[in-house]
Image: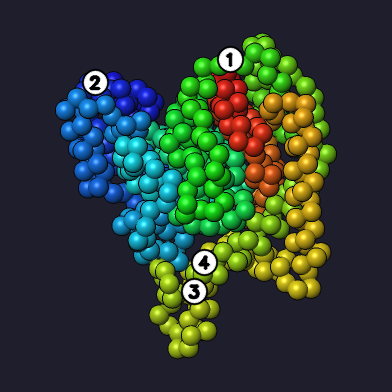
Amino acid sequence: MDLNHLTVDAARTAIQERSTSSVALVESFYTRIQKEDSQIGAYLTLCKERAVEQAEHIDRMAAEGKSLPPLGGIPVAIKDVMCTRGVRTTAGSKILETFIPPFTCTAVRRMEEAGAVILGKLNCDEFAMGSSNENSAYKPVHNPRDLERVPGGSSGGSAAAVAAGMAVATLGSDTGGSIRQPASFCGVVGLKPTYGRVSRYGLIAFASSLDHIGPLTRTVKDAALMLRTIAGRDPMDSTSADIPVPDYVAELQKDVRSLRIGVPKECFGEGLDSEVRASVEAAIQKLAGLGCEVIPVSLPHSPYAIPAYYIVATAEASANLARFDGVRYGFRSAESRTLSDMYRKTRDGGFGAEVKRRIMLGTYALSAGYYDAYYLKAQRVRTLLTRDYEEAFQKVDALVTPASPTAAFKLGEKSDDPLAMYLADIYTVTANLAGIPGISVPGAPTKSGLPIGVQILGKHFDEATILRLAQACE
Ligand code: GLN
């Protein structure tokens, strides 16, 4: 049995039937991390003692013949923007280098309550700001499929860990594409749920109205299992929705025949790489072959999505990041004599260049003289973009688009040009502005051998349909 490439289901069954043990799985993942991760850089912190303890507990249950919980004994890992009690949580930033949270993020807690074993915390762009994982204050992540290329971002560590067999499944966060785009670059499945579907309690905030937590997995079925575990109302997050959580795994049984899928013409224009286009079109053909009705649609405000996103996201980030002042968490500059000097030097030394750029942009967009011209206008555009989707979803059940205009690019290729980096988010940011769910599933392999993600977008709280369509593409 190849212990490092099992699905959630297969691993759980093997532990339950005692053909392997959770401890053996955990050991085998740590061995692989020891061997491979010096080249990949997916992990920032390991918590082995804790993991082995959790695994032993599950193995005892299996030995006693008790039925295991849904994620019983499964080795998983968590993007380092989710707080884990007693385990260092850095958000990929130097300013939180020594931060040990006193509480656990709800999504992580729900995974642990379902029996999952946490191997460690995963590398990411600083405060989840980026599309290549090159903005981590610690080290870049390399794409396991080609070490010269980026894994995508900001959940680069989460995608790379699954792709390299260094975790069965992981959690990531998606503010403008950070689950779907790295999933696309590394050839794994990445799901961003509807806004409010999964609690954000304990997620270090980047842009609160755009942030989402979701799973990265080897298969669509695993994504359904993970979502079922982490979804649902949480009294600790007032934006979490009080809407029943369907059994996403059972929903996968239904076939996709006669579902109407929309193909937005704006997503297939200029700037789209021809291999990506071919792969996404092949997926659409496949769905048509399974009985889906393919309908051309339009999202006319798409050209304004990137500027609107980068105004709203930076504005919210500038407010959220005000709390990192050297008083409450982590790093404090030692060389200051007055309080304001301490704030200044802590933030100057603790934040990286991209984070500073966004704090400045966001503060500017919110300032009295420019609020109407930038922030208010961006919010209006956000409404128009949301209406585009509402109109499209009157005609179709889901939309199929590329997840990213290109396959994984080389490290360093875009890192000197923030605008080129921002433009790579063209197909993902609108779903965050509108709060609709989206999934990236690996499409047909290309000549170059690099993975390409097919993105499927759905109606609010209709994750079940996009999961079904994604499974049909697998
Ligand atoms: N790449 C986008 C950004 O840099 C999205 C990041 C994210 O989803 N966390 O803002």
**Residue 367 image position (x, y, % from top left):** 72, 72
Q: In front: mark 2 or mark 3? A: 2
Observer-nearest of 394 and 122: 394
Image: 413 above or below 74: below
Q: Are marks 4 and 2 in contact (CB under 8 Å)?
A: no
Q: Are marks 1 and 4 in contact (CB under 8 Å)?
A: no
Please name the residue that numbered disc 3 is placed on.
325
Please name the residue that numbered disc 1 is placed on.
255
Kind of residue indicated by mark 4:
Phe
Q: Are marks 3 and 4 in contact (CB under 8 Å)?
A: no
Q: Residues within 10 Å of mark 1 (few under 14, many from 20)?
A: some
Q: Earlier in the sequence, mark 2 or mark 3?
A: 2
Kind of residue indicated by mark 3:
Asp
Instruction: Find the distance from the CA under tag 3 to the CA under tag 1.
Output: 53 Å
Q: In front: mark 4 or mark 2? A: 2
Kind of residue indicated by mark 2:
Glu
Kind of residue indicated by mark 1:
Asp
**Residue 164 image position (x, y, % from top left):** 41, 34
Q: Earlier in the sequence, mark 3 or mark 4?
A: 3
Label placed on residue 17? 2
Residue 400 picture quarter? top right
Image: 360 above or below 314: below
